[in-house]
Amino acid sequence: MGALSPEQILLSWSHAGRIRSEAAFAMLSGTAPVPVSSGRTGRHRLNRLGDRQLNRALHTVVVTRMRCHPATLAYVQRRRAEGKTDKEIRRCLKRYLARHIYRTLNSQIARTDWPTDSGAEWHCVPVGSVVIINGVSSMRTELGDRWDLTIWVETPRFIRLARGVKRDGEAMRFHWTEVWMPEEDAYIAAQQPQQRADLMVNGYGS
C-alpha cells in the first residue's frame, strides 16, 4: 500500500465503533454500488459520494494491484472475459477492498459457550490486540500463515481423556473415546502439528 494510503484510511476510520457496519463504511468510502440498470442490462456505476480522500486512497491501492498483483490480475482477466469494463472492475475491486479493510479494522470473535456447545456473543477485537485461538485442529496446515505464534501442548492420551471427562461429565466418555479422540489421533498422525509448532509445552501437570 505504501505509506500515504494507509494513513488516509486510518484517518478516515478514526476509531473503533465510529462506523456501525460494513455497509456504512462502503458509503463513507464511496464504494457502495449505485444501480444504473436499464431494460435487460444490469449494471452499477461508481459512487461519487462519501469521503473522497478515502476513496482516492482505495483507488490508488486498486490501480496498483491491477498492475502487478497476481491474484488481482487473474480476477481482472476473468471479469473482462465476462464482459465487464475496466471501470466496472475497479468499482468491484474497491468494494472488495473496503470490505476487507472494514473487517480487518473491526475484527470480531465469537465466544464459545461450552455448556451448550454453541457460539455466544461477539466481541470486538481492537487492532493490535492479542487473540488466542485454542483447539487441537487450529494448527491445520491450511491455517499455517494466519498465526504469529503456535504452541503445542504435549499431553498423553490418557490424561487428555481424563481431563475431558472431568470437564464434560461421565456421560460424554463415549464421545471422547469413540468420536473425538479418534479424530484427533487421525489428524495428528496425518498433519503432525507438533512438528510445526513454534513452541512445545509439557502438558503433564495436574
Image (cartoon, rainbow, N blue to C red):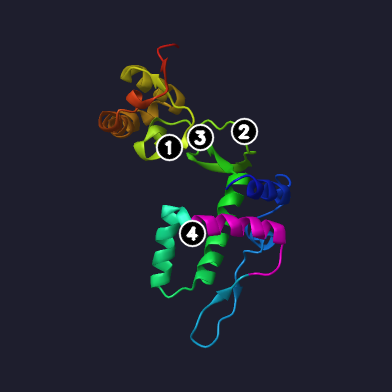
Q: Amino acid at mark 4?
A: Met
Mark 2 or mark 4, which has the lower sequence index?
4
Measured from the top left, where is residue 106 in percent x and y? 63, 46
Q: Nearer the viewer, residue 148 or 201?
A: 148
Mark 1 or mark 2, which has the lower sequence index?
2
**Was residue 96 drawn as part of the magenta stretch in this picture?**
no
Q: Which residues are magenta?
A: 47-65
Q: Amino acid at mark 2?
A: Ser
Residue at image point 27% right, 31% down: 182
Quadrant hosting residue 49: bottom right
Measured from the top left, where is residue 117 in percent x and y? 47, 39
Real-space CA distance between mark 4 and mark 1, rounded to the nearest whole angstrom: 24 Å
Label annotation for residue 129: 2
Q: Amino acid at mark 3?
A: Pro
Q: Which residue is mark 4?
A: 66
Real-space CA distance between mark 1 and mark 2, rounded to the nearest whole angstrom: 18 Å
Residue at image point 60% right, 60% down: 59
Label annotation for residue 115: 3
Crowdedness of circle 3 by 10 Å Cα count: few (<14), some, many (20+)?
A: few
Crowdedness of circle 2 by 10 Å Cα count: few (<14), some, many (20+)?
A: few
